[in-house]
Amino acid sequence: MNTEKTPRLAEGEYRFAALVWDNEPLSSGQLVRLAADALGWKKSTTYTVLKKLCERGILQNDGGRVTAIVKRDAVQRQESTAVVDRAFGGSLPRFVAAFVNEKPLSAAEAAEIRAILDAANTNGGQEP
């Protein structure tokens, strides 16, 4: 999916959408209970945010059955690109350096990153 067409989500919207991504399909009633437990939201807040995200084409509520139109990986790609662009002038190496200087990588994480980089080099930057 083109990141220019992926809507940006505020933090609360992202956490709400994550409830849908993690549990879809689910009923709107289930979503109200999940939002109350996970986010401390009232029923009215849940339905207001659900309506807003449906109007923006991120979620859909079809007869009380809630599903995602925009998937988590598309939002994550868009958000990660925005962070790298905004905070690091678009430099992925500067981002990685800042990250690993703050939080060292485990051997498993380093191996996973190497595999991602190797796959990007062999298939034109597409995910493995």
Image (tube, helix red, strand yellow):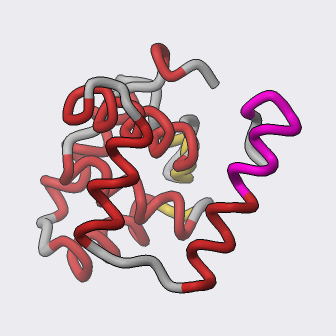
Above/below status of 70 relative to 12? above
Instruction: Give the image location of residue 3, x and y in percent.
Output: 50, 22
Instruction: Give the image location of residue 102, x and y in percent.
Output: 23, 69
Q: Which residues are magenta?
A: 116-125
- Residue at image position (57%, 36%) is 69
Q: For this rendering, which residue is in front, 20 or 29?
A: 20
Above/below status of 26 relative to 95? below
Q: For this rendering, which residue is in front, 66 or 103?
A: 103
Instruction: Give the image location of residue 93, x and y in percent.
Output: 42, 42
**Seen in the image, is 5 located left or right of residue 121?**
left
Seen as rendered, the residue at the extreme right is: 122
How many numbered discs sit on the rendered protein? Answer: 0
- Residue at image position (42%, 60%) is 18
Give residue 108's quadrant in the image.
Answer: bottom right
Seen as rendered, the residue at the extreme top is: 4
Name the main secondary structure of what is drawn in magenta. Answer: helix
Above/below status of 20 relative to 37? above
Instruction: Give the image location of residue 75, x and y in percent.
Output: 46, 40
**Seen in the image, is 46 located left or right of residue 99?**
left
